[in-house]
Amino acid sequence: MADPKLYRRGDIYWTRIQGRRVSTGCRDRHAALLRARELEREAADPVYAASKAISLGSAVTRTLAAIRARGVAGGTLSMYEQKLGHLIRILGADTPLTALTAASVDRYLEQRRSPDEKASDSTLGKELTAIRQVIKWARRAGLYQLAPDQVLPVGFGSGYTPRRRWLSQEQVEKLLAELAPERAAYVCFVLATGARRSELYAAQLADVDWRAGVVWLRGTKTDAADDEVPILPMLAPYLKRALKDAPGLGLPLLFPFWQNDRRDILRACERAKIPGVTWNDLRRTVGQWIRRTGQGVAPHLIGRFLRHRTSRMAELVYAPLDAHGLRGLLAEQMGPVVVAARRAGR
């Protein structure tokens, strides 16, 4: 296609777009030609014109509104807000949506990986998922042309491998011994209920119903998070200890916010000479304890106790079996079969 023709009126170059005289606003001929091409493209392609008219910040705001309208859990919405906040911070809220290109995403990833930010590939994978939502919303609204595969990196791997750290009951006792009783109570509550960190800090005394044998956890991460969990006999002693020493007894919240909780727990682990653990590792500890008791509790039941929507997280992250655990469960399951076979062979 031939370039648009230019002519001057005073110091400014003008052109004709679909029969209309339009000013390029440029005094330099080369700049005017580039602007004329842009104007011609906008006139011929309404979607491209629309994507120039909407800012990246507006597109993100509307995407979050669409996600909220789907009724997602508060934790999921918060995750999208946080991840897209980095996009706005780096590329700019007033940047036209057309500037969201493969090149700009590559620059975004480069900055997030820089020594100043040090974002992991696992974190970046979640951020790219959030950016994909913006692209999908804008395309559906007729405001953006490029497909996600034209913008997002090809073959990006998050590098995520599920953590497998968990503690034995002996190791847990060593950890608790290194914490003041009111701090050990936080750990005991998580061990008794499988609560997430945010759910720990939302717990109230009225949430524990000994008569019904349940604890209500005020979760927001998923639609399955806000639910009751049973008080299991093997975990009940930890719950009793948590309630006895909880620093918030008599207050609205049982466990007031513990400043530097993660750091303090890791330091306690160092003193106890056990592997350092996080709050999620303590949830995984609960899953492993339940998985290895009796006849081996099925993953979907552990997933239900930990309030996952499916058993997949229990199978892959919270209660996977290592060779030792598998051997023990197979021995339990196969023992009767072996005895029956021996009897049949007599």
Image: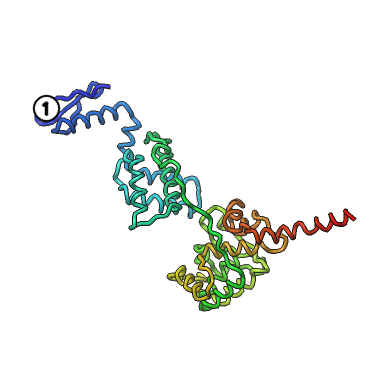
Residue 65: image location, x then y, percent: 42, 46
Please indicate whether residue 199 sits to the left or right of residue 170 in the image.
left
Q: Residue at x 51, y 76 (%)?
A: 179
The count of marks equals 1
Nearer to the camera, 135 or 213: 135
On the image, the x and y values in percent for residue 225 come to 56, 57
The reply to whether residue 147 is visible in this rendering is yes
The quadrant the N terminus occupies is top left
Q: Which residue is at a point 64% across and 55% down the rendered structure image?
A: 299
Taking the spot 44% from the left edge, 49% from the top edge, the residue there is 125
**Residue sitting nearer the eye, 28 or 345:** 345
Relative placement, left or right, of 341 versus 46 is: right
Q: Quadrant of residue 142?
A: top left
Where is 118 relative to 193, above or below?
above
**Occupied quadrant, residue 307:** bottom right
Colouring convention used in this rendered image of the protein: rainbow
Q: Which residue is mark 1?
A: 9
Residue positioned most to the right = 346
Q: Position of residue 334 (x, y in %)?
A: 76, 56
Q: Nearer the viewer, residue 85 or 166?
A: 166
Amino acid carrying label 1: it is Arg
Position of the C terminus, as image quadrant, is: bottom right
Q: The residue tagged with tag 1: helix, strand or loop?
A: strand
Height in image: 206 above or below 308?
below
* Residue at 26% over, 27% down: 40
In this rendering, does residue 250 appear at all?
no
Using the image as rendered, state which of residue 228 and residue 49 is in the foreground.
49
Q: Residue furthest left?
A: 10
Horizontal and vertical percent for residue 281?
Answer: 54, 63
Label 1 crowd (10 A; few <14 / some 14-19 / many >=20): few
